[in-house]
Amino acid sequence: MSLLDNLPHTVSWFRPTASTRDNLGATREGTPITLVTGDSDDPNAWIQNASEKEILEFAKIDQVVTHRVFLITFPDLRPNDYAIVDAGPSYVGLRLNFIANPVDRSAGLGVLQRIMTEEENNPRNSTFGNS
């Protein structure tokens, strides 16, 4: 079996929608659009920490990257889209913000798409007082 048959992580991709103001003037975030739903029976990604070379490469253009995500199929992503790791041996619950377009990477006989992401340090859904 190849790596393409055994990707360890299950990831769901989301696109935020426009925020609105309520009657008291508070800003409410819209419900995100689900682009890809992770299925724990069929893992669809492999997440690794970004290498020092990759971090420095993106720092030159003022972008922060922390992780790279390898995918078999590439969802139609654009800036502000993000992923949440649903299952896997590590990184479960981690929110990763999309940074850079995919690059083809050869993996055995198949091809993986590499996407550069930035870890969300303080996602709004995990802060206290948020419902």
Image: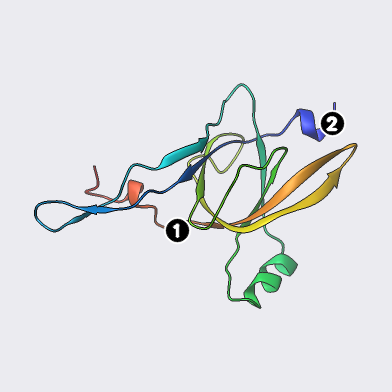
Residue identifier under label 1: 121
Image quadrant where residue 52 sits: bottom right
Numbered label attached to residue 58: none
Please name the residue shown 26% across and 50% down the image. Answer: 128
Percent across and percent down for residue 70 are: 70, 45
Q: Earlier in the sequence, mark 1 or mark 2?
A: 2
Tag count: 2
In the drawing, does residue 25 fall left or right of residue 60? Answer: left
In the drawing, does residue 85 fall left or right of residue 69? Answer: left
Residue identifier under label 2: 2
User: Which residue in the rendered view is the most extreme toward the bottom?
Assistant: 60
Indicate whether 98 appears above or below 109.
Answer: below
In the drawing, does residue 70 fall left or right of residue 41? Answer: right
Q: Amino acid at mark 1?
A: Asn
Query: How was the colour assigned to the protein in this rendering?
Result: rainbow
Percent across and percent down for residue 34 are: 46, 37
Please name the residue shown 72% across and 62% down the image. Answer: 51
Is 87 in front, or is 37?
A: 37
Percent across and percent down for residue 118 are: 55, 59
Q: Amino acid at mark 2?
A: Ser
- Label 1: which secondary element: loop
